[in-house]
Image (cartoon, grey):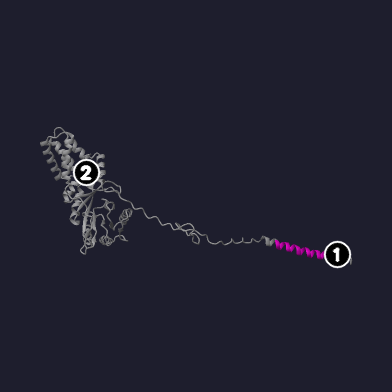
């Protein structure tokens, strides 16, 4: 028993040593399992860079600065030149066959003109909305010249008819637009003010937008007034037309605002900014609605407190025929119309409305709508219009 005692002591010492060794290894393993953060990257001095356009070797310290890219401004269109626009109308009337001119030439080219032939000619003119008075005058003039001159060949008949139609459309009328600024009482420039009126659906707002393009093409500065406050879409539409050619639009921030106030504000802004022309769009109104017509009179009166009216343009749909004459008569009395704008003239055989409306109001057709394109508004020219009717 005593001999075994040293052996147990030795075994006990070995056991203790083994446990200590095992614990040390375990701690080392746990330390290795801990993820240590990577060493920080060395801090380098900021890069030197040369300013754009600087000579080589000229450096500025500091990190590169991101350059700001300015937002692209909306592209401003350059409208088509006004000269030659009516040539397109002439071509379109010729391509459409121009029923008015074709029928007149067909009858006049017959070997012997009977009373029935003359009646057919007069009926053709009436169907083209020339009107009873002007149609009778044209027939009488043609009767006399055919009898005296004895013309029958197609070329001579055409020349004769052209001469009489041009006289009927009356090229002597002043068809220029009064769009030049004038001097006010204090000597400051006052813009020309153009008021645009008409019934619903004739294309007034579109006409105002296209007229703005005509004026911009002539290098005039323009301000638009959205006095159609009953339809927010009308003001939006007018603003879009203006923005395309860099023209500002004065409008109300609420529906149903006083249109006279908007018109007044537009004229005042035009005067303040030294604009050449202020174009005022108005709401469509039926000529038999007295309240709306009275409102139009108010717009006119309020505008003239800031600047005199240069033009009052009545927009008529050329396809409405005699109904357009009724509209013209009432608007002429209330608004003092100085000129007519005929829209949709390229798509109708009723070219005679040009003659009828001029006779009814005693004012000229100054502009005509040729189609749906943004530059399809042209100054009216009597001779080119008649040539279009006759298919030349």
Element under disc 2: helix
For disc 1, the marked residue is 7
x and y percentages locating residue 308 in the rendered image: 21, 60
Position of 28 with respect to 246 (left or right) is right
Query: Which quadrant, please, contains the C terminus?
Result: top left
Query: Which quadrant, please, contains the N terminus?
Result: bottom right
Q: Earlier in the sequence, mark 1 or mark 2?
A: 1
* C-alpha gap between disc 1 and disc 2: 136 Å
The residue nearer to you, when weighing 47 against 232, is 47
x and y percentages locating residue 389 in the rendered image: 21, 41
Element under disc 1: helix
The magenta stretch is: 7-28
Count neighbours of disc 2 (C-alpha within 10 A) and say few if under 14, some if 14 to 19, many if 20 or more. some
Q: Quarter of the image holding residue 20? A: bottom right
x and y percentages locating residue 356 in the rendered image: 17, 47
For disc 2, the marked residue is 384
The residue nearer to you, when weighing 310 against 287, is 310
Determine if the magenta segment contains residue 271. Answer: no
User: Which residue occupies 68% across, 62% down?
Assistant: 31
């Amino acid at each position: 028993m005593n001999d075994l005692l040293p052996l147990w002591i030795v075994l006990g010492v070995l056991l203790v040593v083994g446990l200590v060794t095992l614990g040390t290894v375990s701690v080392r393993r746990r330390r290795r399992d801990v993820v240590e953060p990577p060493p920080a990257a060395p801090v380098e001095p900021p890069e030197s860079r040369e300013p754009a356009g600087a000579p080589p070797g000229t450096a500025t310290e500091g990190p590169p600065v991101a350059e700001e890219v300015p937002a692209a401004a909306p592209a401003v269109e350059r409208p088509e030149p006004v000269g030659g626009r009516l040539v397109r109308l002439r071509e379109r009337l010729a391509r459409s066959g121009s029923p008015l001119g074709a029928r007149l030439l067909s009858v006049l080219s017959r070997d012997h003109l009977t009373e029935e032939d003359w009646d057919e000619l007069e009926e053709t003119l009436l169907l083209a909305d020339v009107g009873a008075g002007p149609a009778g005058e044209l027939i009488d003039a043609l009767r006399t010249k055919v009898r005296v001159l004895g013309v029958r060949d197609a070329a001579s008949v055409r020349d004769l008819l052209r001469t009489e139609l041009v006289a009927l459309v009356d090229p002597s009328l002043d068809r220029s637009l009064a769009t030049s600024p004038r001097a006010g009482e204090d000597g400051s420039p006052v813009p020309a003010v153009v008021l645009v009126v008409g019934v619903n659906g004739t294309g007034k707002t579109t006409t105002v937008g296209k007229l703005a393009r005509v004026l911009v093409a002539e290098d005039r500065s323009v301000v638009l007034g959205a006095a159609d406050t009953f339809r927010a879409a009308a003001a939006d539409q007018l603003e879009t037309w203006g923005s395309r050619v860099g023209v500002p639009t004065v409008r109300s921030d609420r529906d149903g605002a006083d249109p006279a106030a908007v018109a007044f504000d537009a004229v005042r802004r035009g005067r303040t900014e030294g604009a050449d022309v202020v174009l005022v769009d108005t709401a469509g109104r039926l000529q038999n609605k007295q309240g709306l017509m009275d409102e139009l009179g108010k717009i006119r009166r309020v505008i003239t407190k800031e600047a005199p009216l240069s033009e009052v343009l009545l927009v008529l749909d050329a396809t409405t025929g005699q109904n357009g004459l009724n509209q013209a008569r009432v608007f002429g009395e209330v608004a003092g119309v100085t000129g007519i704008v005929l829209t949709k003239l390229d798509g109708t055989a009723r070219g005679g409305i040009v003659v009828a409306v001029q006779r009814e109001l005693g004012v000229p057709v100054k502009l005509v709508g040729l189609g749906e394109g943004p530059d399809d508004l042209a100054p009216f020219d009597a001779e080119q219009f008649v040539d279009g009717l006759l298919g030349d």
